[in-house]
Amino acid sequence: MQQQQRILVTGGCGYIGSHTLVSLLLSTSPTITYSVVVIDNLANSSCESLFRVADICSLDNFTLNSDGTSGSDSNGRLVFRKVDCCDEHSLRDVFEEFQSLGGFTAAIHFAGLKAVGESNTIPLKYYQVNIGATWTLLNLMEEYDCREIVFSSSATVYGVAKDEKAKLKETDEVGVTITNCYGRTKYMIEQILQDFHLSQSLSDNNKKKWSVAILRYFNPAGAHPSGKMGEDPTGIPNNLMPFVAQVAVGRRPHVTIFGNDYDTPDGTGIRDYLHVMDLADGHVAALRHLNHGRGNTQLKIFNLGTGTGYSVIDMITAMGKAVGKPIPHVIGPRRPGDVTIYMADPTRAKEEMGWEATRNLEDMCNDLWRWQTLNPNGYLKE
C-alpha cells in the first residue's frame, strides 16, 4: 500500500523548483506517492509553470483563483499559495491550513534570490531574503512538527578551489574563498542548518529529530523533454545556456565568451553541466534517502553534478548542432572571479542515495532548443 506524503516546496514556480515538481508528482516509488504544496511570491517566476506541470503530470483541472493567489488541481496533488517565505504571518497560515490534513512530511527549500552578479550590488537584500526566508521556514517547520528538509545549496560555497583542476568533494573546504554574496548566503544557510541540526540532536526531548539534506549543485541546463517547461529568466540571462538559446532564436545578436586564455584545451572555462531533470530527480532521491532514515537524526551533504566538464566553446558548439546552425559568438575579457575549471565529484550521491546523472550534453541542448522554439518568449502569452 502506497503512503501519501505532502511536501512543501518553496520557490516551486522557478526553473529548478518546477521541474522538481514533475519528478515528485511522477515518482514511481512502490511505497510512496507525493502531493505538493507550492509557495512562491512570483518575484522571479511565473505561475504559468504550474499549468505546464499539471499538463505534463496529467492532473485534472488545475485552476487559480481570480486574483492568482491560490490554486489547485481537482485532487489536491498540486496546490499553490502565493506567499513570500519572509512573511511569517502568511507562511504560518499555510502551515495552519494543512495541519488538519496531516501537515507536511518534508520541505524542499528553493526560495531565494540567485543572481550572482546582482548579489554583489545589493548584498543586504540577498542576506535579508535568503537567510530571512530560511529562518522563518525553519521556525515554522519546528513548530508544526515538519522535521525533514532538502536545501537547495550551490557549488559556489566552495569558492576558488586550491586545485582548480581537481573535482570538488563534499569534504573540501567551503566558505573561505567565495567570490560573491549569493554564494555567501548559501554558505551561511548551510551553517545555520548544521548548527540547528546539532542543537536538535543534543536535545533530550521526545520530538522526532531533524533530518537535513544539503544539495550542492553545479550548472543546471536543459529543459523538460516535452518542451513545455524550461528556464525563463527575467531580463538578460545570467547563465550561459539560456543566453545561448536566446541568441539562437534571434532575441540577442551574439554570445560573449569571457576570456579565451585559460589553461584549458580551447582556452575557455570548463564547468560541470547537468540536465535539469537529473537535478530534479536528485531532490526526490534526497527525500527518499531522508525517509529511509526516519526516526534517526542525520545531516547529509551531496554534490549533484556529472563529474564531466565542458568548456564554453563545447557548450556553444553543441547548441549549434541542436539548432542546426552555428551560434554567433565573440571573445571578450575575463570576468573578475571566474575560475578555470569547476567540476563535481558526485561519488557520494551515487553511493549513498543511488542518484547519478543519466542525461548527456546532447539531451541538454536538444531539450533546451525544443523549449526555446516552442516558447520563444518563455512563459509569456503570445
Image (spheres, helix red, strand yellow):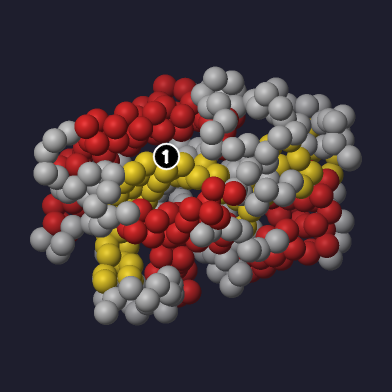
Percent across and percent down for residue 93 are 16, 49
Q: Type of residue at label 1?
A: Gly
x and y percent of residue 228 in the render? 55, 69
Q: Secondary structure at mark 1?
A: loop
| Residue toward you, 42 or 179 | 179
**Residue under the image location 84 percent in, 65 percent down:** 324
Q: Identify the image quadrant of the N terminus.
A: bottom left
Location of residue 325 with respect to 343 vertically, above or below: below
Is there any visible trace of residue 262 in the rendered image?
yes
Q: Which residue is mark 1?
A: 112
Q: Where residue 89 sits: x, y (%)?
A: 17, 41
Query: In this rendering, would 227 be left or right of 354?
Result: right
Q: Residue at x 49, y 26 (%)?
A: 184
Image coordinates for residue 233, horizontal then vertical, percent: 56, 48
**Residue 135 seen in render:** no
- What residue is drawn where x is 46% and y is 37%? 113
Point 40% across, 56% down: residue: 289
Residue 125, located in which quarter of the rendered image? top left
Residue 134 placement: quadrant: top left
Taking depth in this image into account, of 45 and 17 the one nearest to the observer is 17
